[in-house]
Amino acid sequence: MIETDVIIIGAGAAGLMCAHQAARRGRRVLLLDHANKAGKKILMSGGGRCNFTNMYTEPANFLSQNPHFCKSALARYSQWDFVELVVKHDVPYHEKKLGQLFCDRKSSDILEMLLVECDENGVELRLNTSVETIGKTDVGYRLDTSAGAMACQSLVIATGGLSIPTLGATGFGYQAARQFGHNVLPTRAGLVPFTITEPQLKALCTELSGTSVEDCVVSCNGQSFKENILFTHRGLSGPAILQISSYWQPGDTIEIDLLPHLDLPEWLAEQQRQQPNIELKTLLAEPFTKKMANLLAEQWFVSKPLKQYSPGELKAIAERLSAWHLVPAGTEGYRTAEVTLGGVDTREVSSKTLESLKSPGLYFIGEVLDVTGHLGGFNFQWAWASGYAAAQYV
Ligand code: FDA
């Protein structure tokens, strides 16, 4: 039987942070993962450059049924604390936009940095190890694993959410939570592309697949995001769509302002005065691509010279372009989602220590909890902050 102070299940972002920070305190830490490699999502993240935090992180960037929960951990380990670690390891980085910090080189710089910290602080990392059962003992927890029995005082669940099963995601953390009497809030895919099945709209998306429109405002359920959208073979994607997907429920309508920087009624009236003979589709090729302008002019409007539109028709065109309403058929689901919404109910976990209020010595960190960040480095910041907070108490 292996006996240690702390066992962390899940060597992802939160588990790696918690492991080296707890080991720094002198705790004997065993970090387990069923995968053959630690931090696979870190490697895949940010298009291979890991958007590891966001300069403007604040609690408003997170969704949770208990919105105050994330505040304590985020305040005690901020984005600047993580940047300090990145600087200490000479990892070159840059701000891409909107405070999003990315590696200059590749995501593996962040993973290697965390693995070096684990190694230097004496964390024992065991990969290819699956946990079969967890039991409670007088002094802590006992695990039956594929590598034999193990016992610890503190057990940390850091197994993440359900997104991208091919990267090792499982519902293990939710099962463990339920076993110890925790409520698990319904989970669904977040930061995920929409699928469209309505035939005319689907045809438009397919035709325009690969085309993006910059700085659209996408709204749903009282939330708005200004970012790019991208047409895909299956529907719509791009940062603004991924952001709004976390606020969308099946059946909800989303609204897209394709040209928020223009006062469209005024712009169209002005163009009618200045270029009365220009066709609508030619005019729309300025803000959009020629192909998109042609398709919109064909499908949404009757394209003709501007002078032939009545004021009422111009108003209708302006409304359509500034408030395009559509009902997605669904999302691409966990196969491509960046995160999982919902999860372990934070009302039963201490926001200070991340310890279970139901089972002393049991901790939950990272995405397994019902805390989900916006797109832009916030989900990693939550993994770092919650991992750090738990590490001070395990
Ligand atoms: P994480 O998923 O990182 O780790 C969980 C670990 O537990 C994994 O190593 C897994 O193998 C292991 N595990 C699961 N079940 C187990 C079991 N039964 N037994 C043992 N081990 C088990 N965020 C961000 O801020 N910036 C970004 O650029 C990106 N980019 C991005 C791209 C892609 C493609 C995805 C899918 C996600 C992102 N994210 C992101 C989100 C970010 O990756 C995510 O929120 C964090 O990795 C969550 O950290 P955790 O440690 O909680 O889980």
Image (cartoon, rainbow, N blue to C red):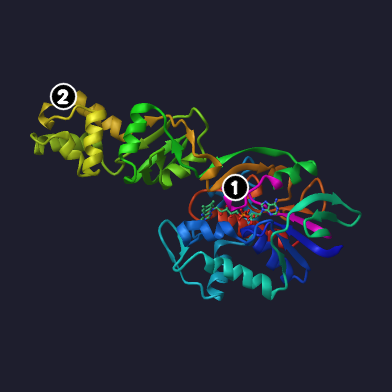
Q: How many marks?
A: 2
Label 1's element?
helix
Left or right: residue 119 versus residue 232 is right
> SS class of the residue under badge 2?
loop
Q: Quadrant of residue 381?
A: bottom right
Write down the quadrant of residue 211 in the picture: top left
* Residue receiving disc 1: 165
Give the image location of residue 179, x and y in percent: 79, 43
Q: Is residue 91 left or right of residue 137?
A: left
Mark 1 crowdedness (10 Å alpha carbons): few <14, some 14-19, many ≥20? few
Where residue 232 sits in the image (x, y, percent)? 38, 41
- Image quadrant occupied by the N terminus: bottom right
Residue 221 showing in the rendered view: no
Residue at image x 51%, y 64%? 107
Residue stretch in magenta? 150-172
The residue sitting at 65% across, 57% down in the picture is 35
* Residue topped by disc 2: 310
